[in-house]
Amino acid sequence: MHAKWKEWVWAFILAMVVIYLYIEVGKETDLIKATLRGYPAMTRPNFWPRVMLVGLLVTGLLKLFLVARKSDDRQPTQNLRKLILVPKVMISIVIVGLYCYLSQYLGFAFSTMAFTAIYMWFLGMRRLKPLVLFPILSTLVVLLVFWRLLYVSVPKGEGIFLMFSNLIMGIVRFGA
């Protein structure tokens, strides 16, 4: 029963963190105001982080539901393994939350590269070449698809991160 109680607590904490981050990221209401004034509706930089947080909230609520339905007839080794994995899951959620929150200040390009490299390292990748190349290439591809082809607005960041974003977006812009 003690392990089930801990799962309830972690699932509840997950739900509360996601709700807080959703509200924090969603303080911008420019899209609604612009649409009501007759301007074309265009996604704002906070749209995709909010979509990610909604997905995280749904999975957290699903976890609560599964914990409520689960019986306590499990082996002790399974309980130990789940108790070890719970902090890892929470750290993953914190990393994703920080990415969503900091992307508006650090810019999409820098925060996505940093997030991808940090998350790959957290999941066990220790080789330097993939840790450097994959975040750069995946960020360039995502920018190409969303920013250049689909015209989705992405946050550019502030200060030196704005200059970095402009440099990366200049690379993606190629020939325009």
Image (cartoon, grey):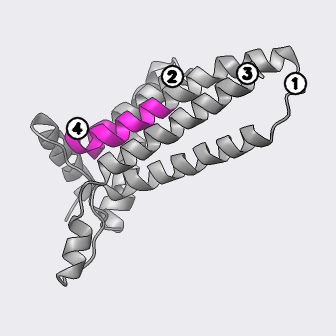
Camera-side residue: 23 or 134? 23
Disc 3: which residue: 3
In reply to whether residue 97 is colored magenta, the answer given is yes
**Contact between labelled residues 4 and 3, with CB atoms less than 8 Å apart:** no
Separation of residues labelled 4 and 1 (CA atoms): 45 Å
Q: Secondary structure at mark 2?
A: helix
- What type is the residue that disc 3 sits on? Ala
Separation of residues labelled 1 and 2 (CA atoms): 29 Å
Q: Secondary structure at mark 1?
A: loop
Please give the name of the residue rendered at 21% of the width and 66% of the height, measured from the top-left corner. Answer: 30
Residue 163 drawn at (x, y percent): 12, 41
Residues shaded magenta:
93-112
Labels 2 and 3: the sequence-earlier one: 3
- Image height check: is 161 above or below 166? above
Disc 4: which residue: 106
Closer to the eye: label 1 or 2: 1
Camera-side residue: 159 or 86? 86
Please give the name of the residue rendered at 73% of the width and 37% of the height, measured from the top-left corner. Answer: 67
Residue 86 drawn at (x, y percent): 62, 24
Separation of residues labelled 2 and 4 (CA atoms): 21 Å
Disc 2: which residue: 122
Labels 3 and 4: the sequence-earlier one: 3
Q: Quadrant of residue 125?
A: top right
Separation of residues labelled 1 and 3 (CA atoms): 10 Å
- In the image: residue 137, left or right of residue 170: right
Please give the name of the residue rendered at 30% of the width and 66% of the height, measured from the top-left corner. Answer: 43
Disc 1: which residue: 74
